[in-house]
């Protein structure tokens, strides 16, 4: 670690960038949750506004460090709230939208459904030091912040789409495309491959996507939109023929059986990220639905 004695930083992100800069480190535009209505007519509704990635870092970092430092100093495995002044501010309502900036992220469990109706899922083993958050964990594949792919003002409207966000993450994390970090000026052309292939599979029924609601990462108090994507094996093998086994964020663990025993073994590991754990529990609970035969339209 670099020496930082007596030096003051304006924010946690400034300190992290100067002292322990991760491999992926950009203050990207992200969509902020402005309001939520789970009982809206037509289904749950989120209103999104403008935020930045460092809004997340400047909140999650101090919360994590505070809990870690307090736990190390205390013999009690559950530190008292009075010893956690930052976290205690959000005790009654961790998603208080009026008291802090709350960014939205999307975590997707990717399942390959075989011809005999079995499921195989994919996991990203994040390598320590490569990412600013959730490094050194087993995590969802793909996953990322809900954000546009370009600095173009038009992109902030055209990319305000969970589905487009998921498609870009498929392309980036599983096919190795350069990450759309929101700093380029060109909008993504979703009529071109591989996006057109994902759209075609979704329309044909050989790719099905479910949303299972919002989860909350208790350590960093960040909400995650929990989704599951199920590909038919023959389509998956074509779309991901060039599946990368290691990317900028970590190593891909392939074809884990979606069965109680194997999922149980994975969940016993000490570094399973909460979004992955939640999605695996949901996938087992709804396995019959997820692995049912699709109605193919072509």
Image: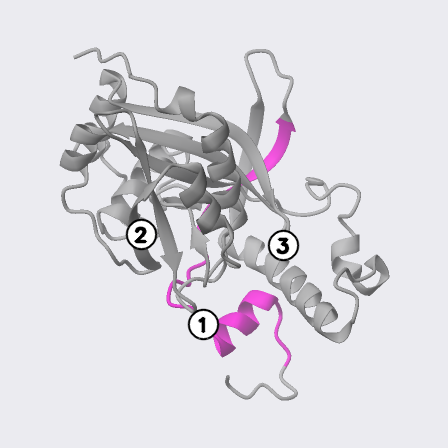
**Extent of the magenta region:** 8-36
Q: Secondary structure at mark 3?
A: loop
Residue 161 on the magenta segment:
no
| Mark 2 and mark 3: Cα distance apart in space | 24 Å
Where does label 1 land, which residue?
A: 21
Label 1 vs label 3: CA separation?
Answer: 21 Å
From the image, state whether disc 2 or disc 3 is nearer to you.
2
Q: Residue at x 20, y 22 (%)?
A: 200
User: In front: mark 1 or mark 2?
Assistant: 2
Residue 99 visible in image: yes
Residue highlighted by disc 2: 253
Q: Secondary structure at mark 2?
A: strand
Q: Residues within 10 Å of mark 2 (few under 14, many from 20)?
A: some
Q: Which quarter of the picture shows residue 114?
A: top left
**What residue sits 44% from the left and 32% below the top?**
227
In this rendering, position of residue 77 left or right of residue 118: right
Q: Give above or below for 160 relative to 216.
A: above
Closer to the camera: disc 1 or disc 3?
Answer: 3
The quadrant holding residue 5 is bottom right
User: According to the image, label 3 marks what residue?
Assistant: 219
Res. 193 in view? no
């Amino acid at each position: 670690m670099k020496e930082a004695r007596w030096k003051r930083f304006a924010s946690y992100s400034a300190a992290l960038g100067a002292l322990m800069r991760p491999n992926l480190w950009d203050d990207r535009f992200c969509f902020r949750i402005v309001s939520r209505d789970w009982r809206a007519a037509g289904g749950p509704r989120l209103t999104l506004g403008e935020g930045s990635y460092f809004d997340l870092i400047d909140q999650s970092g101090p919360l994590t460090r505070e809990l870690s430092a307090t736990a190390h100093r205390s013999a009690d495995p559950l530190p008292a709230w009075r010893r956690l002044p930052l976290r205690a501010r959000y005790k009654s309502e961790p998603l208080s939208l009026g008291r802090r900036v709350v960014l939205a992220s999307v975590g997707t469990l990717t399942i390959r459904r075989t011809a005999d109706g079995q499921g195989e899922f994919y996991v990203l083993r994040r390598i320590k030091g490569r990412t600013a958050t959730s490094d050194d964990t087993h995590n969802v594949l793909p996953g990322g912040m809900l954000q546009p792919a370009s600095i173009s003002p038009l992109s902030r409207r055209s990319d305000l789409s969970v589905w487009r966000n998921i498609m870009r993450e498929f392309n980036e994390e599983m096919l190795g495309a350069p990450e759309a970090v929101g700093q380029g000026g060109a909008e993504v052309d979703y009529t071109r491959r591989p996006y057109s292939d994902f759209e075609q599979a979704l329309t044909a029924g050989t790719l099905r996507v479910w949303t299972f609601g919002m989860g909350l990462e208790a350590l960093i108090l960040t909400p995650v939109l929990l989704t599951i994507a199920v590909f038919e094996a023959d389509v998956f093998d074509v779309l991901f023929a060039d599946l990368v086994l290691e990317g900028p964020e970590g190593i891909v663990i392939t074809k884990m059986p979606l069965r109680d025993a194997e999922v149980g073994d994975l969940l016993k590991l000490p570094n399973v990220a909460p979004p992955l754990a939640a999605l695996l529990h949901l996938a087992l609970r709804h396995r019959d639905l997820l692995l049912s035969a699709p109605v193919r339209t072509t």
